Amino acid sequence: MIFYCPNCWSELPGRQRLCVRCHLEVSSWDEKTFTAKLLQSLSHPEPMTQLRAVYLLGEKKATQAVGALVELFRRTSNPFLKSEVVEAVAKIGGDSAFSLLIEALQDPSFIVRGEVVNALTKFPERGAVERALERALKDPSFYVRETAKQTLEGLRSMSE
């Protein structure tokens, strides 16, 4: 098993308690809250650790994480990580999360744009959501267009 410093993510030999790179006393990590540990994990070098942290922040509806999630979305090129961020911010909600979804409708990956279309339905601003979905109806991807069409029809049928 490989152990990493929770501060600088350097590999720790064995169960060493002091990081040779940043000199963090590894036991100080135990004093952090779970949410703080998840936020720190967003910069972990192992992609699956980042994915798990994003997922858990969304499940916790950690409002204090939205800024860090937006930053992660903007710095990664991994469409699966971006999709997970989209899903997480949709669960958390709020204006910053909604702004990220609108921005993400322009993402190069159809996978991400499709996830955005699904995530938009979690926001109460029906007018803004419908306008965003109408824009998605013109997306170059058939998948995104069809998802937007079905989502928009579902929203409109619920309002009737």
Image (tube, grey):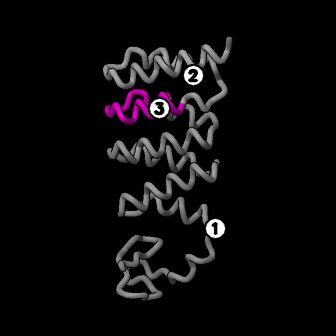
Label 3–label 1 contact, CB within 8 A? no
The answer to which of marks 2 and 1 sits earlier in the sequence is 1
Tell me which residue sits at (58%, 28%) in the image.
Answer: 121
Q: Amino acid at mark 2?
A: Val
Tell me which residue sits at (63%, 53%) in the image.
Answer: 60
Most foreground residue, 157 or 139: 157
Most foreground residue, 156 or 27: 156
- Residue 124: horizontal and vertical position, in percent? 66, 27
Q: Main secondary structure of the magenta part?
A: helix
Label 2–label 1 contact, CB within 8 A? no
- Residue 106: horizontal and vertical position, in percent? 39, 27
**Residue 104 within the magenta-colored segment of the rendering:** yes
- Residue 67: horizontal and vertical position, in percent? 55, 46
Spatial separation of the CA atoms under disc 3 and disc 1:
30 Å
Say which residue label 3 marks.
Answer: 116
Say which residue label 2 marks.
Answer: 129
Tell me which residue sits at (59%, 77%) in the image.
Answer: 30
Say which residue label 1 marks.
Answer: 33
